[in-house]
Amino acid sequence: MSNRSTMTITGNAGDADDVLLSRAVAGDRAAIEEVRTRGVAEPALLEEFALWQADELRLARAARSLDVVADRVDATRSKSGAYGRPFVASRAGLGWAVAAVLAVALVARDWSGARNGAADVNSNVAGLGSAFSPSFASSDDAFNAYLAKAREEGALVGDPQPPVFLGSRELGDGSGFEVVVVRQIYEIRRTSEMYRMQPVDETGRVRPVVIRPRTETVR
Amino acid sequence: MTERNSTNHHASLRFSEESARGKHASEDDVRLAEVADLAEARLHARAAQGEVEAIESVWRRNRRWIAAVLAAHAPRGVEIEDLLQEVAATFLAKAREIRDAASVRGWLRVVAVNEARMAARDRGIERKSLARFAASWRGESADRHAAAEARETLELLARLPAQYAEPLLLQAGQGLSQREIAEILDVPETTIETRLARARRMLRQLVAEDELRREEARTTGNHDVTKQRTGTEVHGSMMR
């Protein structure tokens, strides 16, 4: 280690001091010792060292946020085309407008599916009743199970946002309050087409119309 | 194949020896490091044979620093997590082709930088992913102050040129040694040392300017002052 600190530094004294400080904040003991020794006569160097150490701590803390992202990606569950997929409703990109359109698309798909194959839908639902009967202690448990499954499938983007408070009413029996909140969940779904529900006549009937919204073009 | 690459066969061993050799490293420390290297070499050998569990294990050991590399190079409009998925998928597909365990890190870094560059080329945009990530980062911890500070730090880092931000993130964020970074980036260790020193100097100046503007904003009550910094990048004599 000591040979690194005595290495000849080319350039001006400022560069040499920067290299020394850089080594010191990275934990090179010889460099730390040199800073301490020189600091007796050059208190400014010690002050600079303290500031660089503070920056180093900031960097380490900031890097944890990248670690959180990295820890979500496993090789065996990775998806090529993640940033090049045909349609992405990202948290910070397309936003709620596209998310709403996507919701319409899903509704439209269900609507057309029900119209074209109501029997299939019904049989599927009936099948669920007999073959799949999950038991949850509460709706919150069911919700959490859904989140876990969606995260596992890669359908959940980030973590759910805190509920948005809409309003409250006092309960007449004095037992407390009824609070209305909205839970926001950002999901990624893939669809070959997108639709808008368009009114057909004055009776309020609607039909799905294929649209091509202006979205980000990705590979 | 560069001269550096030809020495990569024993790179992994050197990494651990370097760590173990610190001031008070004992022979036991060095022996432990050698055992760890042997275990790692065996793990890579299993990964090269296509053993999924080993591939996953190798990936998990490396994914954090790969995220740091992507953060330093990726363009605006691309999620770091998405690019990381691409790198992971490539690794999963090609792990069997990597015969030299010691070169895995260099290989992964090249894949990561290529992914970032392809994303930038496709979109014709500059490197700003770190700034975007910083802006979107809400902190997955309950500590709002810590999350805000992390966001500010990442925003400052995004203003450094990639060649400086990358080694700084790898060392200060991931704890890699200069030698490890030099191996991964395939450049001389002295170059890494210089880049690290300059990166830290640049960051110090940015932090100092940021604090000064905040102080001015506090004293004058003009909060727009703090926004002026967002348009500036690090230029001039600092970028040598």
Image: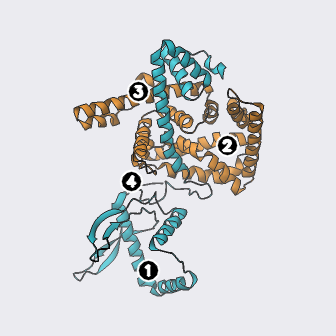
The residue under the point 56% across, 85% down is: A130
Marks 2 & 4 on one chain: no
Closer to the eye: label 4 or 1: 4
In the image, which disc is placed on residue A93?
4
Depth check: B228 or A202 in front?
A: B228
Please report, as a chain letter, where disc 2 is located: B
Q: Secondary structure at mark 1?
A: helix
Amino acid bearing label 1: Gly
**Chain under callout 3:** B
State which quarter of the image contains the N terminus of chain B: top right
Crowdedness near tag 4: few (<14), some (14–19) or many (≥20) residues, C-alpha within 10 Å: some
Disc on the earlier residue, 4 or 1? 4
- Is residue A202 positioned above or below B226 on the image? below
Tell me which amino acid carries mark 2. Val
- For chain A, the rendered hue is cyan
Q: Could you tell me if residue A142 is visible in this image?
A: yes
**Image spot of residue B101 (x, y percent):** 72, 43
What label does residue A113 carry, if any? 1
Q: Give the image quarter of residue A183.
A: bottom left
How far apart are the two marked residues, 2 and 4, measured between alpha carbons? 34 Å
Residue at 54% in and 77% down: A134
Contact check, label 4 and label 1, Cβ < 8 Å = no
Q: Position of residue B44 (x, y in %)?
A: 72, 47
Task: Tell me if mark 2 has few (under 14), some (14-19) or many (20+) residues whose alpha carbon lies within 10 angstroms of its own.
Answer: many
Point out the residue furthest to the front here: A174
Specify the amino acid type for callout 4.
Gly
Residue type at the position of mark 3: Gln
Label 3–label 1 contact, CB within 8 A? no
Residue B49 higher or lower than A21, as above or below: below
Can you identify the residue that label 2 sits on?
B104
Q: Which residue is mark 3?
A: B205
